[in-house]
Structures are given as structure tokens and as C-alpha cells.
Image: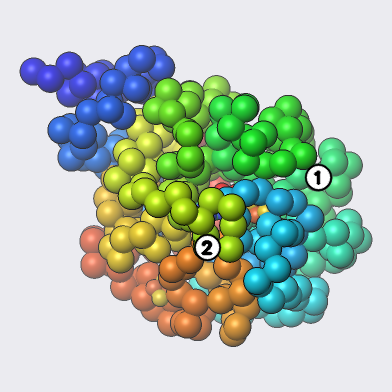
């Protein structure tokens, strides 16, 4: 039998793989379907058939950072910038709760307009709806994270992007790997459910570093892990770096499911932007979460991280109907719970 099939069987039982074992599986495309099926079984065993929907409000595309891969980077002058006012954000959350969302994600560039007091106002008002609130606002101080938590924020998403320190610091000018990790530590310490993740298929990213990304998620015991295929944006310095990252992203995601069986793992928007069936494929290969866009109007188009982003012309209502239809078409159900991670005994 192929050695990698044995490794997958081992990981399905004990949820451990070494760096060398992960590399060996990542390099072998002959076992992909076996890996995806194993991840699907583990998903079913540990987190069940329910899919958690998190409605995402992309409330500002203004960013003080300059990440080379991202269309929102401050040096991009080809993008029309916007920021939503607090009452607009709260209003979108109200509507989303009306559709049935139990969890709201607030995401933006690193926009300093939103002071701690403004964020506290937004978070505490959204919490009145009885939903879980997740923030994805980038790097902040311990005191800022603490203030958001005290206003009711439950979760925070911050991808490490890559555990290759040199690559990270090349791609994220004037940002340091130590600071990124400090943020993740502070968030854990403050009692947030912590989401992290990586970009898959970055220029000069090695298979070894992808294996280390997976081990990093396990080491920090991440509650949520979002894997994004890197999609080159024509308004960024990485515009000419064209590769097909879909399959390798699903592989990384399936391995994450084997190693962190009870984590929440989204079928990401970027996956569907590369493959029109991408989220259903991801949901059948280990994922148990989807994050539909609940921003309205032209802002959907203007949050242009990468090209070909899905749902830019739809309304939140259309997305709700679309995604709930896809979920039931594969025999899964939409969760009516907040969708917190439930830590499980790995025996
Ligand atoms: N500013 C916050 C941050 O960076 O954590 C949150 C917003 S940022 C747009 C959200 C995520 O978008 C990043 O963590 C990054 O992984 C992803 N992203 C940026 N550029 C991308 C690209 N070209 N392809 C795919 N994902 C991308
Ligand atoms: Fe800003 Fe986040 Fe994009 Fe970096 S990835 S430029 S921090 S929005
Ligand atoms: Fe937006 Fe399908 S989820 S159109």
C-alpha cells in the first residue's frame, strides 16, 4: 500500500502527523481523494452535519498597511475607498439576524477611523441581537482587544498568513512575525475564540512551510482555521504571479481537519472564487462553516481584495437562499446555534 495512505489512516486515528509526514502527503497527488474522504469522515464524527453560517460585513476597505498580495493595500490608488458609519453596520447586522444568522463577522482594513469607543458602540449594539460577534480588524494593542472583549466580542480572526518568517516580512512590509504572534497570544489570553489561517500558493512559499503552517495551527490549538488560496490582484505587485492553488488549498484544509478534528473550518469565499463549486467541495473535504457576505450594494464590489470575488452583484437575501440551497443539496443542515467550538475528547 502507498505509504501516504497509511499515514492518512494513522492521522484519522490519532490526529498527529510530523512535518516530514505532512510534506510527503502534500507532495503526493495520487492520494487526494482518499485524504478528502478521510477529512470528511472526521468532520462528520467530531462536528457533525450542521454547517454554521457567519454573515460577514466588510465595513471599510481603508487600510494603513501595504501587504503585497492584497487589493486593499494603501499603495493601491486604483480602488475607490469607503467606510460604513456605525449605524449602517448595526443596521446590516439587524437585517442579517432577521434572515437567521446566529453569528456576525465584522471585517475591515486597518482603518484608524474606528476608535475603541466607536467599536465598543458597534459591538455592544450588535450583541443585543443575541448573536455571536467575530472581529477581523487586524493588529491592535492588548488594551484594544480587551475593550472589544468587554463590549461582548466573542471571536477574533487573524491569519498568520504564512509561518515562513522571511516570506511574511517580505510580503507584509513594516509588519513583523513576532507582532502577529503577539496578537494571537493576547487574543487567546483574553478568552476569545481565536481564528487563524494562511494563504496557500504565495510566491516562494515552500511545501515545507505549508506543513509548518498546519503544525502551527495545532500548536496554538486554533479554534477556527481559514485557508485561503492566494489569488493575484492586478492592482498589486504580485499581479503576474499566476498559479492554480485550488487543489492544494483543499489538501491543506483536509489535513488541518485531520489534525484539529473539532475546530471550525470555513469553506472560504476565495475557494469558490477559483472554482464555481468550491465551497461544496470544501464542505465535502473537511469544512463545516461558510461566511456569506451580508454587506449591501456597491460596497461588495469595492472590497476588492482579489479579482473574481463571488457574490459582488447579489443581495444578502440572494446569498442566504443560494448558500442554504447548496448546503441542503449535499444532505447537510444549517445550524441554528451560535457555532462555538466544542472541545472534544480525541479518543
Ligand atoms: N486587515 C485584516 C487582516 O489583514 O487581518 C482583515 C482583512 S484582510 C482583507 C483578510 C484576509 O484577506 C487576509 O488575512 C488575507 O489572508 C486575505 N487576502 C488578502 N489578499 C488576498 C489575495 N490576493 N488572495 C486571497 N486572499 C487574500
Ligand atoms: Fe490591509 Fe489586511 Fe489587506 Fe494587509 S491583508 S493590506 S492588513 S486589509
Ligand atoms: Fe452569494 Fe451564492 S452565496 S450568490
Could you tell me which residue is drawn at 66 percent across and 72 percent down?
79
The secondary element bearing badge 2 is classed as loop
The secondary element bearing badge 1 is classed as loop
Q: Nearer the viewer, residue 17 or 15?
A: 17
Q: Which mark is residue 140?
A: 1
Could you tell me which residue is drawn at 69 percent across and 30 percent down?
177
In the picture, measured across the screen, residue 261 lies left or right of residue 99, that is left
Q: Quadrant of the C terminus?
A: top left
For the residues labelled 2 and 1, say whether their Cβ atoms are less than 8 Å apart.
no
Q: Which mark is residue 234?
A: 2
Residue 173 percent coordinates (x, y):
72, 41
Q: Which mark is residue 71?
A: none
- Quarter occupied by residue 32: top left
Q: Is residue 52 above or below residue 170?
A: below
Sequence order check: which comes first, mark 2 or mark 1?
1
Q: Is residue 215 above or below residue 120?
A: above
Q: Residue furthest left?
A: 1
Q: Mark 1 packing: few (<14 Cα in 10 Å), some, or many (20+)?
A: some
Q: Nearer the viewer, residue 113 or 7?
A: 113
- Of badges 2 and 1, the one in the foreground is 2
In the picture, measured across the screen, residue 265 lies left or right of residue 82, that is left
Amino acid at each position: 500500500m502507498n505509504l501516504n495512505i497509511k499515514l492518512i489512516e494513522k492521522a484519522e486515528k490519532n490526529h498527529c502527523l510530523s512535518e516530514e509526514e505532512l510534506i510527503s502527503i502534500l507532495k503526493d497527488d495520487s492520494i487526494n481523494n482518499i485524504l478528502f474522504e478521510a477529512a470528511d469522515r472526521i468532520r462528520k464524527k467530531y462536528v457533525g452535519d450542521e454547517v454554521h453560517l457567519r454573515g460577514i460585513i466588510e465595513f471599510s476597505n481603508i487600510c494603513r498597511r501595504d501587504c503585497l498580495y492584497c487589493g486593499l493595500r494603501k499603495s493601491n490608488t486604483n480602488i475607490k475607498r469607503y467606510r460604513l458609519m456605525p449605524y449602517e453596520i448595526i443596521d446590516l447586522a439587524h437585517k442579517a439576524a432577521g434572515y437567521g444568522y446566529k453569528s456576525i463577522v465584522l471585517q475591515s482594513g486597518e482603518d484608524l477611523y474606528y476608535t475603541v469607543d466607536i467599536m465598543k458602540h458597534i459591538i455592544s449594539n450588535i450583541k443585543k441581537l443575541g448573536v455571536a460577534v467575530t472581529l477581523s480588524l487586524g493588529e491592535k494593542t492588548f488594551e484594544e482587544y480587551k475593550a472589544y472583549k468587554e463590549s461582548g466580542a466573542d471571536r477574533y480572526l487573524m491569519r498568520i498568513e504564512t509561518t515562513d518568517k522571511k516570506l511574511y516580512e517580505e510580503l507584509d512590509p513594516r509588519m513583523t512575525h513576532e507582532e502577529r504572534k503577539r496578537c494571537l497570544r493576547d487574543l487567546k489570553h483574553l478568552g476569545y475564540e481565536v481564528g487563524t489561517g494562511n494563504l496557500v500558493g504565495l510566491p516562494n512559499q515552500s511545501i515545507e512551510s505549508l506543513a509548518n503552517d498546519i503544525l502551527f495551527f495545532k500548536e496554538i490549538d486554533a479554534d477556527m482555521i481559514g485557508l485561503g488560496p492566494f489569488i493575484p490582484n492586478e492592482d498589486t505587485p504580485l499581479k503576474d504571479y499566476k498559479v492554480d492553488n485550488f487543489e492544494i488549498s483543499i489538501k491543506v484544509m483536509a489535513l488541518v481537519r485531520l489534525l484539529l478534528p473539532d475546530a471550525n473550518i470555513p469553506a472560504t469565499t476565495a475557494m469558490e472564487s477559483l472554482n464555481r463549486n468550491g465551497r461544496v467541495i470544501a464542505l465535502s473535504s473537511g469544512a463545516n462553516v461558510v461566511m456569506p457576505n451580508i454587506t449591501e450594494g456597491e460596497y461588495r464590489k469595492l472590497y476588492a481584495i482579489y479579482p473574481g470575488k463571488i457574490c459582488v452583484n447579489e443581495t444578502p437575501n440572494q446569498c442566504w437562499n443560494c448558500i442554504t440551497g447548496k448546503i441542503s443539496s449535499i444532505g447537510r443542515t444549517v445550524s441554528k446555534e451560535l457555532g462555538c467550538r466544542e472541545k472534544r475528547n480525541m479518543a
